[in-house]
Structures are given as structure tokens and as C-alpha cells.
């Protein structure tokens, strides 16, 4: 493995749960950039409320850069990380980007049952807003190096699929 593995995808796609499992399977450290941001700056919702989205994206860029400067790892990104051009360019240069593609209906179900409030959609996710945001982001997500269709599969099954795809690409030893 010569590059970090960065998991991208829409909110509630399972990047953190798949990332944790994939890291264990590959024997690599795991970094969740949202957790890094919270540890350094407070909750994501508070950053958005206090300082706005631009300030949050600056914190996110800092967290992604720190993860990429560390040992090779599996990195779970926030759903909007790749929408920020400086972050996207850094990831393109230094990581193998894996898009976890989850059908919008599953995303909507997960968001409705999530305990976490997502600042860009609020405490009661409106379907129209989620679909709009998903449609805006999808073309950028699809620029990833690898696309994995997740469906309703478990994080363990998706992690195994990601590892298999990496082996097919010659990124992992068989």
C-alpha cells in the first residue's frame, strides 16, 4: 500500500463504520476526520452555528492534511469534504479515494433515524433538501478512484468488497 485510503460519500453512507472495519482488516490505523475536528474545535453543529460553513471547511482541510501527513491509514471523510476544492485537490494527490455509493432511499432512512443533527439538513431532514444536496455532490463523488455500491449490505461486507477492489487494482498484496 503506497497511499492512504480515503472513504468518501454522502452523509450516513457508512464511511466511519466501513472505515473502522476496513482498517482492522488491512491492519492500518483509522482516522475519522469529523472526530478529529470535534476533538480540536468542538461539535460540527457548533462550528457551523458559531463560525459558518467556510470555517468548518477550513477545519476539515486541516484535519485531512493532518491525517495525510501521518502514517498510512484508512481515513473516513465528512460527506462534504470533497466539495471543498483545496481538500479535494489534496486528496486527489495523496490518497486513493473510495466512493461508498448508497442509494438515496437508504440514506434518507438512516438520516431520519440518526441521533446526530447534520447542519446542512437540520434536525428533521426534508427529503427534497437531502435529494438536492445529494444530486449536487454526486458528480464530485463519482470522480473517486474506486466506486463501491453499498446497497443494504453490512459495513463488514462493504469493507471486504473495498479490500477486494483494492487487490484487483494491485493496491494490496493478494
Image (cartoon, rainbow, N blue to C red):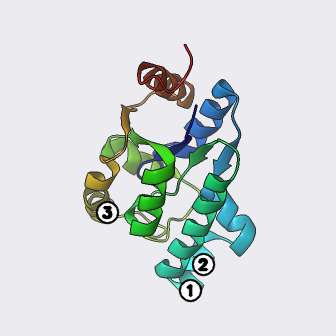
Q: Between residue 92 and residue 36, name the one nearer to us.
A: 92
Is 171 drawn above or below residue 105 in the view shown? above
Name the N-terminal-most of marks 3 and 1.
1
Q: Quadrant of residue 120?
A: bottom left
**Residue 118: image x %, image y %?**
50, 65
Name the N-terminal-most of marks 3 and 2.
2
Quadrant in the picture for the N terminus: top right
Quadrant in the picture for the C terminus: top right
Is 129 drawn above or below residue 149 in the view shown? below
Please state if 40 lies on the left or on the right of 111 as rendered: right
Q: Who's the residue at 56% across and 67% down the image?
A: 60
Q: Who's the residue at 47% across and 63% down the image?
A: 87
Q: Which residue is mark 1?
A: 51
Residue 11 in view here: no
Residue 99 in view here: yes
Please state if 132 lies on the left or on the right of 164 as rendered: left
**Residue 93: image x %, image y %?**
46, 52
Is 160 drawn above or below residue 137 in the view shown? above
Contact (CB < 8 A) between labels 3 and 2?
A: no
Q: Residue furthest right?
A: 39
Q: Which residue is mark 2?
A: 47
**Residue 32: image x %, image y %?**
63, 52
Q: Which numbered marker is on residue 159?
A: none
Please state if 117 lies on the left or on the right of 135 as rendered: right
Q: Quadrant of residue 148?
A: top left
Q: Between residue 44 and residue 66, name the one nearer to us.
A: 66
Density class for disc 1 (Cα within 10 Å; few <14, some 14-19, many ≥20) is: few
Q: Who's the residue at 62% across and 78% down the image?
A: 46
- Rounded to the nearest angstrom, the CA distance separating label 3 from label 1 is 21 Å
Contact (CB < 8 A) between labels 1 and 2?
A: yes
Q: Which numbered marker is on residue 133?
A: 3
Amino acid at each position: 500500500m503506497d497511499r492512504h485510503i480515503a472513504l468518501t460519500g454522502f452523509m450516513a453512507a457508512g464511511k466511519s463504520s466501513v472505515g473502522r472495519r476496513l482498517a482492522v482488516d488491512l491492519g492500518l490505523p483509522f482516522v475519522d476526520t469529523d472526530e478529529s475536528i470535534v476533538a480540536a474545535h468542538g461539535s460540527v453543529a457548533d462550528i457551523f452555528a458559531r463560525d459558518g460553513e467556510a470555517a468548518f471547511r477550513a477545519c476539515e482541510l486541516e484535519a485531512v492534511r493532518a491525517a495525510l501527513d501521518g502514517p498510512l491509514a484508512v481515513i473516513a471523510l465528512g460527506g462534504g469534504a470533497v466539495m471543498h476544492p483545496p481538500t479535494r485537490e489534496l486528496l486527489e494527490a495523496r490518497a486513493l479515494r473510495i466512493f461508498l455509493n448508497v442509494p438515496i432511499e437508504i440514506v434518507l432512512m438512516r438520516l431520519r433515524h440518526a441521533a446526530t443533527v447534520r447542519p446542512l439538513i437540520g434536525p428533521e431532514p426534508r427529503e427534497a433538501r437531502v435529494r438536492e444536496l445529494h444530486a449536487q455532490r454526486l458528480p464530485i463523488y463519482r470522480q473517486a478512484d474506486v466506486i463501491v455500491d453499498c446497497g443494504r449490505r453490512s459495513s463488514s461486507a462493504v469493507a471486504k468488497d473495498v479490500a477486494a477492489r483494492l487487490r484487483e487494482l494491485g493496491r494490496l498484496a493478494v
